[in-house]
Image: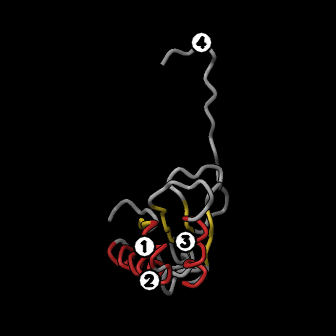
Amino acid sequence: PGAHLPAATLVGKQSVVADPEAAAKRALAALEHIRRLCPFEILPGEPPAPSVANQDGVRKGVVKLGWSWENRFVLTFNNAAQLQSRLVEMMTIPGCVSSYCIVQEWVDFDFEMRLYFLPPGDLVP
């Protein structure tokens, strides 16, 4: 509860292939449940956290593969129907062998910072 992380849940490929609509509904219900258990503290005058878009319930978020990097294999959704299609799209990418994808609530952000460490060639770990 004190971690203040965005709500996220795993969705299995089998559930997406069997019934994408039900998989999307379960994912959104899981995000709502997690958000109720672990709310973000919002002080007077602060915007809703972690996003304005989800202040009245989780509707917006991302679907991503666990090893996504540099925004590769990350798809946004804005409602349940779009989540359903994004789940199908993500789990049926040619060559995808992942058994699960991550569905995460949207987080408002101002910028994204990436830090790269380029070790010297003679570094011995």
Q: Which residue is mark 1?
A: 15
Q: Residues within 10 Å of mark 1 (few under 14, many from 20)?
A: some
As shown in the figure, which amino acid type bears the numbered disc 1?
Answer: Ser
- The secondary element bearing badge 3 is classed as helix
Residue 95 is left or right of residue 41, and the answer is right
Amino acid type at mark 2: Ala
Residue that numbered label 3 is attached to: 87
Residue pushed farthest bottom? 56
| Location of residue 110 in the rendering, given as x and y in whole percent from the top left corner | 66, 62
Q: Position of residue 93 (x, y in %)?
A: 61, 61
Q: Residue at x 35, y 78 (%)?
A: 33
Mark 1 and mark 2: span between their CA atoms?
8 Å
Upstream in sequence: badge 2 or badge 4: 2
Disc 4 residue type? Answer: Asp
Q: Position of residue 100 (x, y in %)?
A: 45, 61
Q: Around disc 4, counting alpha carbons within 10 Å, would you say few (fewer than 14), some (14 to 19), or many (20 or more)? A: few
Q: Amino acid at mark 3?
A: Leu
Give the quarter of the figure containing the N terminus: bottom left
Q: Nearer the viewer, mark 4 or mark 1?
A: 1
Identify the residue shown where x is 58% and y is 65%.
92
Number of numbered discs on residues: 4
Location of mark 2 (residue): 22
Tell me the CA gap for discs 3 and 2: 11 Å
Identify the residue at the far top of this view: 122
Does the image show residue 62?
yes
